[in-house]
Amino acid sequence: MDLSFVILGGVAVAAFVMVFMVKRSSGYRSMLNQLENENNLIEMRIHSVEEEREQVKSSLAVLRGRLKAHEEAVEAQKRAVSDAALQREQARAETFLEYMVRQGIVTKEHLVKVKTYKEKNASQNSVEELLIMLDFISLATLQQAQAAYEAGKMSAE
């Protein structure tokens, strides 16, 4: 009987060890499953953050484009204001004869011929009158040019 108690004791110890190991391994399995779940959640969060990062990059590129377009528009507006101010200043300082040359109503050569004629003949007529007399422009053209010149002067002031 002693041998049977020893065998029975050995089987009991073996069963105890087996139960202990099964419980311990199920605890490890449970812990491993929990860690795998946490790892999956972390990977999902990482993926979500990476997607958000790409969206932010895209938004940043769009905003940079809009900023550049805005800066270019501001520069263009500044140039336009500066050009308008320069034109107003030029219009204030421009003589009627310079205006007519700039508008293509008469040429510089016409003015040279008129001034030469005026000096040679000691004419008392104005340059404008001589332009008409020498048939470089008509009276109607001169009157239209004077009206436009005066209107430009008024708007420049």
Image (cartoon, grey):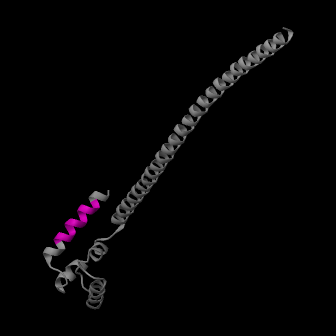
As drawn, which residue projects farthest toward the right?
2
Q: Judge whether residue 146 is colored magenta.
A: yes
Q: Quadrant of the C terminus?
A: bottom left
Instruction: Name the dominant secondary structure of the magenta segment.
Output: helix
Q: In this view, does 65 lie above or below 104?
A: above
Q: Considering depth in this image, is 52 or 90 the residue closer to the camera?
A: 52
Q: Is residue 6 left or right of residue 94?
A: right
Identify the magenta region. Answer: 143-153
Q: Quadrant of the N terminus?
A: top right
Number of numbered markers = 0
Q: Judge whether residue 36 is colored magenta.
A: no
Question: Which picture quadrant has residue 28?
Answer: top right
Rendered residue at 79%/12% (across/down): 8
As drawn, which residue projects farthest toward the left?
140
Question: Which picture quadrant has residue 144?
Answer: bottom left
Q: Give residue 61's position: percent from left, percent from top.
A: 48, 50
As drawn, which residue projects farthest toward the front?
1
Rendered residue at 15%/79% (across/down): 138
Q: Considering depth in this image, is 33 or 116 the residue closer to the camera?
A: 33
Rendered residue at 55%/34% (across/down): 45
Rendered residue at 28%/62% (across/down): 153
Q: Considering depth in this image, is 72 or 96 the residue closer to the camera?
A: 72
